[in-house]
Amino acid sequence: MSENRRPQVSRRGFLGGAAAVAAATAVPAFAQAAGAVPAAGRPNILLIVTDDQPKHTEWALPKTLAWLADQGVRFTNGHVTTPLCSPSRSSVFSGRHAHNHGVRNNKASHALDQSTTVQKYLKQAGYRTGLFGKYLNSWTLADNPPHFEEFALLQPGYVDAQWNVDGTVQTISGYTTTVVRNRTLKFLDKAATDTRPWFAYVTPYASHGPRTSEAKYAGTPVPDWNGRPSVPENDRSDKPAYVKNATGTLADGRTVRAEQLRTLLSVDDAVQAFKDKLQALGQLDNTLVIYIGDNGFSWGDHGWTAKSVPYRPAHEVPFYLSWPAGGLGAGTVDDRIVANIDIAPTILDAAGITPGAPQDGTSLLSSRSRDHLLVEWWKQGTATGGVPTWSSYVAKDKQYTEYYDLTTDGNGTVSGTGQVKFREYYDLVDDPYQLTNKLYRATPSDEQALGIPALATRLAADRTA
């Protein structure tokens, strides 16, 4: 994947010149950012990962935005590299694409090499580490998550759920986002007497289905929504078969959206509680906070009301960052293409740690910028129907997607011919809602004019890099 950079600048200054990045020269994909740890010492790390949260959910997060966006950095081109829970979370942990970390579907969580994770590097470097909420799909609840000193691991659910708390499986009564909040606050409280820097991985189940809201938010009115041109897109003749057969409606999208927003109101309360606690502890300034959704979700776009597809609502996510002691506390908009694979490199860069394993992402504390991103997804099993395996070249102005004759088993092992079965190309400037597939009935000369041969070559290279 090609990347560019300007000459290195200070962390306090790099964001102001982000627009100039495009004129720079190429660097290796695994190059690490330079820069010293702030004088205050290694930062604490608060990493918040929500579940199935798409963009355009800001209404539910006023407190989160007031802290992390208005007083931090709002990334307007935030993505995940696989729009599915466990592969995405494994990319967060490892800084690697799914084809490199091996967790290609939700059944393959144990394929992740735990020695390559950010929590391993931080614990090894003396950080106090904690996990509160969802971990990895298909992870056995009784198995303790490696490299976390304290944990309350959630068996996904919203009310009176099963948890593994520091090695003991138990039922905890109440709403799970509240449990996540309180367990995290208890972990943070220990910073008053434990002088080690800490890493808290905080992962509420919101806004995943069945999208059960906290009792106090049940039925809360949400702003009206009249859809967008892709909802539901009546003419899908240029789309692959699974999209042609999709049945999601505007009414379906409205229902999903309203339910997601109500669950996120409780997340917003939790984030405010974290801020208040850090302020009381005197640790607000030197805590690096990152907030991201593990994947997006379609609200009836192209008839689809789920994730797992190469369309923008499924892989674009909210992405915020704050670190006042690192110069990232002023309220800035950053339009670089950034992704979940950039989180581990950013955290390790801030902590002054060099990873022992290669990473596909790059530190957001540097001035580096990519011109496109590889997004990929694998079909699990050989049953007829569903979303085929695909990969996609995603840039700001265009997106090129190939679907393949490939499937994976529960271990993430790939089989099939690899033959390209269908292709899509969208001009994201003139067609941001991906309504017109320019490869539908395209001639060879049309493809040449669109630059398809070069895009196909680049995509092939990205898939093996």
Image: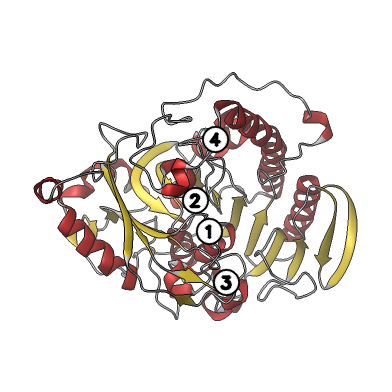
Q: Quadrant of the C terminus?
A: bottom left
> Does dot 4 land on a helix, a strand or a loop?
loop
Q: Are marks 4 and 2 in contact (CB under 8 Å)?
A: no
338 up-or-down from 121: above or below:
above
Q: Looking at the rendered structure, which numbered label has been put on residue 122?
A: 3
In the image, what residue type sits under mark 3? Answer: Leu
Residue at 50% in and 44% down? 320
> Would you identify the image quadrant in which residue 434 lies?
top left
> Does dot 2 land on a helix, a strand or a loop?
helix
Mark 3 or 4 closer to N-term? 3
Residue at 75% in and 59% down? 187
Give percent across and percent down for residue 183.
79, 55
Q: Which residue is mark 4?
A: 299
Distance in Å between CA atoms under marks 4 and 1: 44 Å
Q: Nearer the viewer, mark 2 or mark 3?
A: 3
> Would you identify the image quadrant in which residue 58 lies?
top right
Q: Nearer the viewer, mark 3 or mark 4?
A: 4
Q: Which residue is mark 1?
A: 40
Q: Are marks 3 and 4 in contact (CB under 8 Å)?
A: no
Give percent across and percent down for residue 221.
70, 20
Mark 4 or 2 closer to N-term? 4
Distance in Å between CA atoms under marks 1 and 2: 8 Å
